[in-house]
């Protein structure tokens, strides 16, 4: 008999059973424990589970928050919506129940290893039903699937059957690493980019330190984080210090913080997750005062590429921002889609019109180019 439940903590689901649904994932049970412990403001965590009798067959993280419809808008469009929000506070905000995670790039909905692929779509439909029922308990009208891979037909078919609308979301940037050296990687890039990066490498660079404990530099880490956050056009969540320390503690050898020093001053940091298959860039924070002289972003990029080469890691997964630079740096892009439905037909109709204006590719040409590649 198929049943579904929603839990308020991931600890209600056995670690091995959860991880069996996501083989090889870096953002696994331990990652979500760290996220849960961090108690990120304005988010309430939910965990959806589908059982066949007593056997877990499908799971997905979910969250509840107040969502601004212009979260993925940038440029001129963002300036317009910010003016609208000042004139009419709250007009762009809705209560949201979403399958997925604000701190993961794609919707992590998995099925147990013993479940045939032919049953996956039906189990995703069960997760959608469970999400709608759980959202009703909290009095939330809008249910969404955040960043489902565009090529995942099971998700698109399940959402379409449930009457969900769709729109493009932020694509995920990946850099395959088949190179034998950083020089070989540079040789794969366009002439102007290759020349620019080699010039940057000849300039003095910061000292690089790989750390799994950052307790002694936490004030500097958060100073750099806050400074970077202020400059960001798109930001869904504000990470507390416990996120950074918790990830390093909970994931142990699968997480590291790369520190960049100029003399005795910390000028940048990069939190990454890694295993034998991939390196995931979770957050890069830097001091704008030093960025130009020391090319901090590109130094960090090449440091990560070099690490992947040295450790035979095949994929550098590098985030959902900075698409103009990532196009130049040779990235490939995986499309993501947002699916959503409001239980009120009138609000749902308004959202159908609004999505035309709030598509992320409407205001960012580089993002539009990245989405077009997918």
Image (cartoon, grey):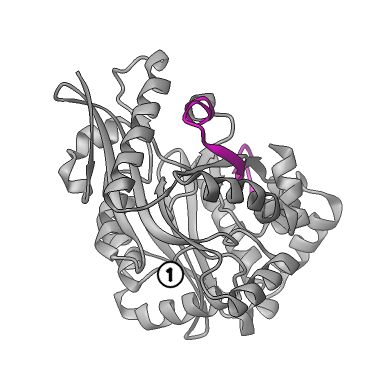
193 w.r.t. 279: above or below? below
Q: Nearer the viewer, residue 373 or 268?
A: 373
Judge from the rendering whether residue 271 lies leftward or rightward of residue 197; answer left or right: left
Q: Is residue 286 visible?
A: no
User: Magenta span has 174?
Assistant: yes
In terms of secondary structure, where does tag 1 sit?
Answer: loop
Please state the horizontal and vertical placement of residue 43, each as a whole percent of the image. 35, 61
Compared across the picture, whether 59 is left or right of 298 comes to left
- Point out residue 159 in the picture as x, y percentages from the top left corner: 49, 31
As for residue 104 lying within the magenta part, the answer is no
Q: Quadrant of the C terminus?
A: top right
Residue, x 20% and y 40% (percent of image)? Answer: 15
Q: How many marks?
A: 1
> Which region is colored magenta?
156-181
* Residue to which mark 1 is pinned: 238
Residue 286, image x and y in percent? 55, 75
Residue at x 48% of width, y 48% of height: 279
Residue in view at x 71 percent, y 58 percent: 325
Q: Is residue 153 above or below residue 41?
A: above
Q: Percent x, y for residue 9? A: 21, 50
Q: Is residue 230 above or below residue 101?
A: below
**Residue at 62% over, 46% down:** 352
As drawn, the residue found furthest toward the front would be 346
When asked about the image quadrant of residue 302, the answer is bottom right
Residue 81 in view, yes or no: yes
Residue 312 vs residue 295: left or right? left
């Amino acid at each position: 008999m198929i049943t579904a439940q929603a839990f308020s903590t991931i600890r209600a689901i056995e670690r091995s059973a959860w991880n069996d649904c996501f083989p090889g994932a870096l953002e696994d049970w331990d990652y979500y424990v760290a996220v849960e412990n961090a108690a990120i403001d304005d988010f309430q965590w939910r965990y959806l589970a589908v059982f066949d009798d007593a056997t877990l067959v499908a799971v997905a993280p979910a969250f509840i928050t107040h969502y601004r419809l212009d979260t993925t808008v940038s440029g001129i469009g963002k300036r317009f919506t910010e003016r609208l929000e000042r004139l009419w506070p709250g007009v762009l905000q809705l209560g949201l129940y979403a399958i997925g995670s604000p701190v993961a790039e794609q919707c992590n909905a998995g099925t147990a290893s013993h479940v045939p692929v032919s049953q996956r779509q039906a189990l995703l439909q069960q997760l959608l039903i469970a999400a709608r029922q759980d959202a009703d308990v909290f009095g939330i009208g809008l249910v969404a699937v955040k960043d489902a891979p565009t090529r995942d037909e099971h998700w698109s078919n399940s959402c379409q059957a449930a009457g969900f609308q769709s729109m493009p979301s932020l694509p995920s940037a990946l850099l395959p690493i088949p190179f034998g050296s950083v020089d070989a990687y540079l040789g794969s890039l366009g002439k102007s980019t290759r020349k620019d990066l080699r010039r940057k490498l000849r300039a003095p660079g910061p000292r690089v330190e790989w750390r799994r404990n950052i307790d002694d530099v936490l004030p500097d880490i958060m100073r750099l984080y806050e400074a970077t956050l202020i400059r960001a056009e798109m930001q869904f969540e504000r990470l507390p210090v416990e996120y950074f320390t918790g990830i390093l503690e909970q994931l142990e050898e699968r997480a590291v913080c790369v520190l960049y020093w100029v003399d005795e001053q910390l000028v940048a940091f990069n939190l990454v997750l890694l295993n034998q298959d991939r390196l995931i860039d979770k957050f890069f924070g830097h001091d704008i005062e030093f960025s130009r002289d020391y090319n901090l972003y590109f130094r960090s990029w090449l440091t990560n590429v070099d690490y992947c080469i040295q450790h035979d890691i095949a994929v550098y997964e590098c985030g959902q921002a900075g698409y103009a630079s990532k196009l130049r740096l040779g990235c490939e892009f995986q499309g993501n889609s947002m699916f959503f439905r409001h239980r009120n037909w009138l609000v749902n109709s308004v959202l159908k019109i609004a999505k035309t204006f709030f598509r992320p590719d409407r205001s960012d040409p580089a993002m539009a180019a990245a989405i077009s590649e997918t």
